[in-house]
Structure formats: structure tokens, C-alpha cells
């Protein structure tokens, strides 16, 4: 059985000024029996500090399904002046870490109780669009591939990478969560992935894609 262990207090160090976004979406339910409705908690976002001036904001919903907490990631955006152009796969892993860290604060201590099972769903296919903005004067926006351009940004030059959902899919990943006490006080969350992520659906897009766009999986 494949297990991937995340140390959720590791500091992520990023460089360069960018804005990254996964367009808000509604992935398929991967609906199971006895699942409650999806609900928004608070403002429906989780902000993950990556480093000074850079953060990842994750949009999500939550529900209980047969007594198991399930999270559905609807989208993400990364903005700041000290970030880098990370891949959709890396941003997905950062989103997982942030959600599990926020949820696992009340989990049992590792080795002293039963670990908490958590399911996370995400749309598992995207195509990438990179845009460059040039200021001052009238904004010059160039995107590859073409398509809907993101909102204008009031900066002299900025590069944006967006990950736009495509295909009819959802991706399910199962984790077990527990806590480990730190010598200095408090605790951090340990999350172990149980088995590989499972994808439902296809990366074949039923909607036309911009010229040059390729619909790619990010489930595994």
C-alpha cells in the first residue's frame, strides 16, 4: 500500500513575482451513499502563507459521508510579489497540506488513538494558460493559449499562470490524520496518504479548448 507522509509544518520557500489561479469550478460529486450535502464553512476559503508576500487561497466545501469528513476543492489562487510559477500538481499538494493542517488540529495523538480519516476531492484535469501584462499606458495583455483573459492588474509587468478545469472528472484522495507533540510545546499534524488517488471520469473535454491547449490530469 502506497503511503506518502507530509510534515505539515515545513516552510515552503518560493521566488519571483506572479499570480497563479485555478478557476473556481464545481467538480463532480463522486457521490456515495449516505453523504450529506456540500456546505461552505466561514467564507469558504483557506489561506496558506507560503512566504512573505506570497500566499495560496483555496476555495473548498465540506460534508460528512458515512461519518467521514470530506473536502471538495473548488479552486485556488496564488498571488504575491515573491512567488514562483509552480505547476498545477505542486499547487494541488500545497492545497492538500493546508486543508489537512487546518482540519487536523483536533485529531488524536499519533500512536495514542485512532487516526482520523479524511477524503479530499478535486477536479483532476486542467489546461494551463500563461499571460503577460505590460504597463504603464493602455494595458497590453498576451496569453498563451488564447481564451478568456484574467482581470487587469495595476502593475508595470506581471506574469500570470492559470490552471483552468477541463474534462468531466473528479479525483479522490484518502488520508489518515494524527498529531505529533513538539518539544517546544503545541503539536503539528501528520497526514498519511492511503493508497493512490483515484480518478473518476475522463480528461477528454466536451467543451472546445483554445488553440494549443492540452487537457492534462493532475490526479496522480
Image (cartoon, rainbow, N blue to C red):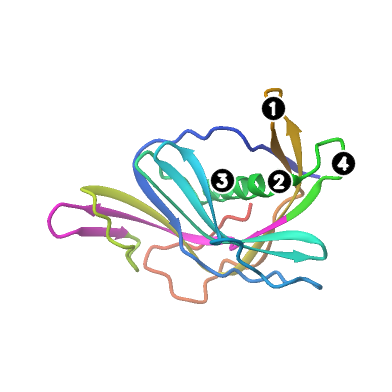
In depth, the one of 181 and 28 nearer the eye is 181
Decide whether residue 122 is among the magenta residues: yes
Q: Eyeballing the image, is 42 above or below 112?
A: below
In depth, the one of 184 and 12 nearer the eye is 184
**Residue 37 rendering spot, x and y as whole percentages:** 69, 73
Q: Eyeballing the image, is 38 above or below 103?
A: below
Q: Tell me which residue sits at (59%, 68%) in the image.
A: 27
Instruction: Mark 3 vs mark 2: give the one in front.
Output: 2
Magenta extent: 119-143
Q: CA distance from mark 2 to mark 4?
A: 13 Å
Instruction: Mark 1 vs mark 2: give the one in front.
Output: 1
**Residue 158 rendering spot, x and y as whole percentages:** 28, 49
Q: Earlier in the sequence, mark 1 or mark 2?
A: 2
Q: CA distance from mark 3 to mark 2?
A: 15 Å
In-image side of 162 versus 58 (left or right): left
Give the number of the disc on residue 185.
Answer: 1
Mark 4 and mark 1 in contact (Cβ < 8 Å)?
no
Dot 2, crowdedness within 10 Å: few (<14), some or many (≥20)? many
Q: CA distance from mark 1 to mark 4?
A: 20 Å
Q: Earlier in the sequence, mark 2 or mark 4?
A: 2
In-image side of 32 versus 7 (left or right): right
Dot 1, crowdedness within 10 Å: few (<14), some or many (≥20)? few
Q: CA distance from mark 1 to mark 2?
A: 17 Å
Give the number of the disc on residue 113.
Answer: 4
From the image, tell me which residue sits under label 3: 94
From the image, tell me which residue sits under label 2: 104
Say which element carries label 2: helix
Q: Eyeballing the image, is 113 above or below 159?
A: above
Amino acid at each position: 500500500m502506497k503511503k506518502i507522509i507530509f510534515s505539515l509544518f515545513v516552510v515552503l520557500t518560493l521566488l519571483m513575482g506572479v499570480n497563479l489561479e485555478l478557476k473556481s469550478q464545481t467538480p463532480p460529486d463522486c457521490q456515495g451513499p449516505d453523504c450529506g450535502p456540500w456546505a461552505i464553512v466561514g467564507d469558504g476559503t483557506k489561506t496558506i502563507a507560503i512566504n512573505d508576500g506570497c500566499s495560496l487561497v483555496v476555495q473548498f466545501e465540506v460534508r460528512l459521508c458515512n461519518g467521514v469528513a470530506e473536502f471538495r476543492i473548488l479552486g485556488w489562487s496564488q498571488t504575491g510579489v515573491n512567488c514562483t510559477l509552480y505547476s498545477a500538481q505542486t499547487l494541488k499538494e500545497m492545497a492538500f497540506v493546508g486543508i489537512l493542517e487546518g482540519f487536523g488540529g483536533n485529531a488524536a495523538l499519533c500512536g495514542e488513538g485512532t487516526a482520523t480519516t479524511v477524503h479530499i476531492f478535486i477536479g483532476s484535469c486542467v489546461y494551463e494558460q500563461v499571460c503577460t501584462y505590460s504597463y504603464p499606458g493602455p494595458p497590453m495583455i498576451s496569453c498563451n493559449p488564447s481564451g478568456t483573459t484574467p482581470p487587469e492588474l495595476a502593475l508595470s509587468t506581471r506574469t500570470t499562470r492559470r490552471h483552468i478545469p477541463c474534462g468531466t472528472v473528479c479525483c479522490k484522495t484518502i488520508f489518515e490524520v494524527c498529531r505529533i507533540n513538539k518539544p517546544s510545546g503545541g503539536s503539528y499534524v501528520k497526514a498519511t496518504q492511503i493508497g493512490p488517488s483515484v480518478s473518476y471520469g475522463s480528461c477528454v473535454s466536451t467543451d472546445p479548448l483554445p488553440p494549443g491547449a492540452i487537457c492534462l490530469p493532475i490526479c496522480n
